[in-house]
Amino acid sequence: MKINKPKQPAPIDVSSINKDAMLEELVETIGSKVLKLAFTYVKDQKIAEDLTQEAFLKCYKNWDHFRGESSLKTWVYSITINLCKDYLKSWSFRNLLYLDFAPKQTTVRDSVLDQVLERSQKKELAAAVLNLPVKYREVIILFYYENYRVDEISSLLQLSENTVRTRLRRAKELLQKKVQKETRDDDGR
């Protein structure tokens, strides 16, 4: 029996592509996704914006080093993830405390109760995902929010596919425990 392996995309020859135009197109097409990805790591909008800008700048500077073995999107994501991890290991992140003195006010508009509850549940789930340890958060974000397959996440994070599956399972278990705990806490009030 012959097993058909999925075809790998042909390597991209970047030497013939105008890097200014390609960078502009990348920013337009995946810029917001890269920003969201950075935010899931650092949990601060301004720092995420800085890291996103730095990721695209790094892509521009290293354009000639892109081997074309993956998609441009995967390459940019990989650079962004590495920058975020470096930031989280940095002295400034670990030793400086940023306080937001102005509490964020939310306005409640008249709307259907179901829509309010659904938004609330989505926010709670997003907050729970952001509170996961980085190794679980990154696989959840890439798998569920960015729709990457396990093999793509494995390649992107340089982990085995089994490790990615294990982290996905453990992350889901942690999220389920958190949701169940909050449900019990809400019922106990």
Image (cartoon, rainbow, N blue to C red):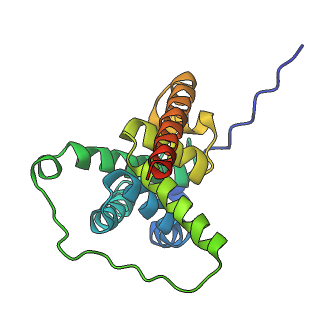
Name the image quarter holding residue 161. top right
Q: Nearer the viewer, residue 81 or 96?
A: 96
What is the x, y in percent for residue 68? 54, 46
From what the image shows, is residue 67 above or below residue 37?
above
Task: Give the residue displayed 63% in from the left and 74% down from the top.
Answer: 113
From what the image shows, is residue 146 above or below residue 35?
above
Question: Which residue is the extreme one toward the top?
Answer: 1
Question: Which residue is the extreme one toward the right?
Answer: 1
What is the x, y in percent for residue 33? 50, 62
Residue 68 placement, left or right of 100:
right
Task: Give the residue displayed 21% in from the left and 77% down from the top.
Answer: 102
Task: Give the residue displayed 57% in from the left and 28% down from the top.
Answer: 165
Name the image quarter holding residue 118. bottom right
Residue 138 placement, left or right of 98:
right
Question: Which residue is the extreme one toward the bottom?
Answer: 110
Question: Which residue is the extreme one toward the front?
Answer: 189
Residue 65 visible from this viewpoint: no
What is the x, y in percent for residue 14? 52, 55
Task: Give the residue displayed 44% in from the left and 43% down from the top.
Answer: 137
Residue 1 placement, left or right of 153:
right
Residue 146 placement, left or right of 128:
right
What is the x, y in percent for residue 74? 52, 49
